[in-house]
Image (spheres, rainbow, N blue to C red):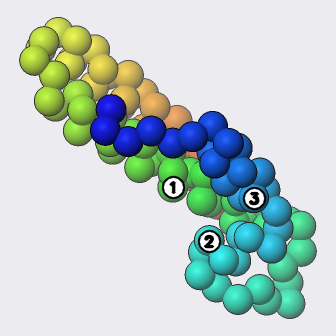
Amino acid sequence: MSEVISIRKARHWREAAHLPETVPAIVGAAPSRDSGPLTIVKEEIRLLILLLDLAAQGARVLAGKMSDPLRSQNLEARITAIENQIQVARQVASRL
């Protein structure tokens, strides 16, 4: 690995991400009048689903670079299952 994130920095980022005032900064939007707890939770869920989707896409790229076709197919099948679960999470989140 060419780049390693320190545990202290990762913990700081994780803890900072849970503060309600950081959500608008992450999204790039100013807080609105209806920025109640439910709105913040909805936005956090949306961002988490987005991150999971990006992670699945990254895993799919890595699976394509694997030299063992059997392992690559196995990983592709697992990624497809995860993407199906992400789609279910999107549908559930849209009903919130």
**Residue 20 located left or right of residue 62:** right
Q: Quadrant of residue 88?
A: top right
Task: Tell me where residue 20 sits by quadrant.
Answer: bottom right
**SS at mark 1 in the image:** helix
Looking at marks 2 and 1 on the same chain, the residue that comes earlier in the sequence is marked by 2
Q: Identify the disc placed on residue 15.
A: none
At label 2, the amino acid type is Ile
Is residue 50 shown above or below 65? below
What mark, if any, has residue 16 been given in the picture?
3
Query: Residue beneath label 1, please?
Result: 50
> Residue 26 has which mark?
2
Q: From the viewer's perspective, is residue 20 above or below residue 92?
A: below
- Name the residue nearer the viewer: 16 or 95: 16
Mark 3 closeness class: few <14, some 14–19, many ≥20 residues within 10 Å: few
Q: Secondary structure at mark 3?
A: helix
x 45%, y 39%: residue? 4
Amino acid on which the number 3 mark rests in the picture? Ala
Q: Earlier in the sequence, mark 2 or mark 3?
A: 3
> Which residue lies at the image location 72% right of the left edge and 58% below the top edge?
17
* Left/right of residue 67 with respect to residue 27 in the rendered view: left
Image point 22% across, 12% down: which residue? 71
Cα distance in 3D space between marks 2 and 3 = 11 Å
Q: Is residue 70 left or right of residue 96?
A: left
Q: Amino acid at mark 1?
A: Leu
Residue 16 sits above or below residue 76 on the image: below
What is the spatial separation of the Cα atoms under label 3 and label 1, in whole angstroms?
18 Å
